[in-house]
Image: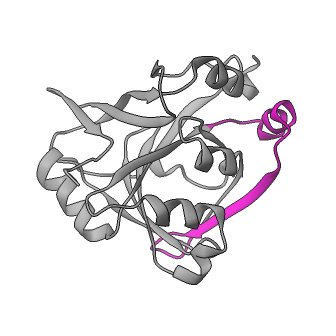
Amino acid sequence: MSPATELALDHVLLAVTDLAAAAAQLEARFGLTSLEGGRHTAWGTANRIVPLGDSYLELVTVVDEIAASKSTFGRWVDGMRSRSGRLIGWAVRTKDLDSVARRLDLGISDGSRLDPSGAELRWRGAGLEAAAAEPALPFFIEWDPRSPHPGRLSAAHRTGEVTLARLELTADPVRLAAWLGEGRLPIVVQPGAPAVTRVILRAREREIVLGEAVAGG
């Protein structure tokens, strides 16, 4: 695999019913600070970001029911969100989305949102429909080089610096390996129905474990 087509774990999705309430629970229980993200107007969703350096957690909810009902992403979030947050999917980053899309015969779509300052973040994505239907599979994202990566935002986590150590999944290992190609990622896979089961974060003095139901329901 060439450097351009190498994959990295970009972010993990947590679907919530209320962004502010879920953010408060993450702060109180785990010492994780989240920042206002913005709205995905075309998808009917909005998010908050928990920066983790090269990766991040994305708290996401539906804010426009009509728009969400017309988009794959919006329907996915709407069908899975819970009060405290549920792990529903993940994304891997590439610098050559075109090659990934050709290998898997996927279409590519453009995405964007405005951050709180009004600046536009842009990216391209592929594989979202498959990820929504089979959440152990990630979707693929290529960030516009002019857009700052959300994981690099400054956040004062109460536990100090926090990074994403590994992601635990249940999946068909052969199916997942074929989807990812030759990429090496910090994931642990057990056989089972497709799901993101746990995210393990590494803080300065301890590990933080987020389960499928992140904060109890």
Question: Which quadrant: the C terminus?
Answer: bottom left
Q: Residue at x 83, y 49 (%)?
A: 107
Whole-percent x, y for residue 154 in the image: 35, 51
**Residue, far front:** 193
Question: What kind of colouring is applied to the model shown?
Answer: one colour
**Part of the protein shown in magenta:** 93-119
**126 relative position to 85: left or right:** right
Question: Which quadrant: the N terminus?
Answer: top right
Q: Residue at x 19, y 50 (%)?
A: 216
Where is residue 22, by image quadrant?
bottom left
Q: Is 56 situated above or below 197?
A: below
Whole-percent x, y for residue 212 in the image: 33, 42
**104 relative position to 42: left or right:** right
Whole-percent x, y for residue 18 in the image: 31, 70
Q: Is 72 situated above or below 57?
A: below
Q: Is 94 situated above or below 130?
A: above
Magenta-drawn stretch contains 94: yes
Whole-percent x, y for residue 3 in the image: 72, 22
